[in-house]
Image (cartoon, helix red, strand yellow):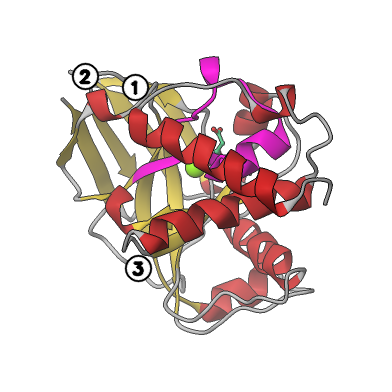
Amino acid sequence: MTLDQDTIQKLAAHLEDAELDVRAVAKITDTHPTLDWDDAYAIQAAIRARKEARGQRVAGLKAGLTSRAKMKQMGVDTPVFGLLFDYMSVANGGEIEASKLIHPKVEAEIAFVLKQPLRGPGCHAGAVLAATDFVVPAVEIIDSRYENFRFDLTSVIADNTSASRFVVGDVARGVEGLDLRTLGLVMEKNGEIVAMAAGAAVLGHPAIAVAALANHLARRGEEIPAGTFIMSGGATEAIPVAAGDAIHVRFQDLGSTSMRFV
Ligand code: OOG
Ligand code: MG
């Protein structure tokens, strides 16, 4: 930790206000270059406390920057972890108001729901699969609060890993008989294919991203509780969207997820 409590609270307010006012701001490492990982997660926790004080609730957890495509697009090399809140959830096939977002992008992800808690350290893909109740297809709408979507790892962690909205499809399947590495997905924007991937794009197997989250939380003395919804990270690079765009992602064996930006 390099920042005092007062600075952490101020930066949390600064970033959350940018989200609520739909306004991009300079990345916080420009003004706080010493900001380290613990500071960044402390700012993210302070944003959570602000939202919870307003009656909003955590609806799930997310891993991000878990695929080569995403790491390359953003110029970073390590996964990050963030929080999904209840107000971010959009019904499958639903509408998203583009004017409430700064510069949204969409990414296709495989999401997990646990039937047993997961605790690190030493959590691995096998433990994740054994603890998984079912997987569902999902699309995350990310919306960095930073100008031009430019950031470094600590800035993006503090900004709750760009979390903004998410859409979950309606086909849920147990992992038995599903090979999540070869499970393919095709993303269409306005009827044109804009991205394709297989589950293995996410750290070799999307369950590895969930294990990494459990190991990350273990360093803070926390576990992932049973019942938790977890997004494993974009398998393809993120695609910019604007009002008028329709997104449809077809997942092999898992149906599809769609939304319209209005
Ligand atoms: C950070 C969030 C990344 C993912 O799935 O890779 C993320 C960003 O790229 O803005 O959610
Ligand atoms: Mg994501």
Of the image marks 3 and 1, the number of the one nearer the N terminus: 3
Q: Which mark is residue 170?
A: none
Of the image marks 2 and 1, the number of the one nearer the N terminus: 1
Which quarter of the figure has residue 178? bottom left
Viewer-closest of 113 and 28: 28
Q: Is residue 262 at all visible to an observer of this figure?
A: yes
Q: Is residue 234 at all visible to an observer of this figure?
A: no
Residue at 66% from the left image edge and 75% from the top image edge: 222
Is residue 162 part of the magenta span, yes or no?
yes
Q: Amino acid at mark 1?
A: Ile
Total labels drawn: 3
- Residue interval drawn in magenta: 143-165
Q: Amino acid at mark 3?
A: Arg
Q: Which mark is residue 243?
A: 2
Residue to which mark 1 is pinned: 193
SS at circle 1: strand
User: In the picture provided, is 101 more to the left or to the right than 70?
Assistant: left
Check the picture and name the quadrant holding the C terminus. Answer: top left
Residue at 21% from the left image edge and 19% from the top image edge: 243
Cβ–Cβ under 8 Å for marks 2 and 1: no
Residue to which mark 3 is pinned: 173
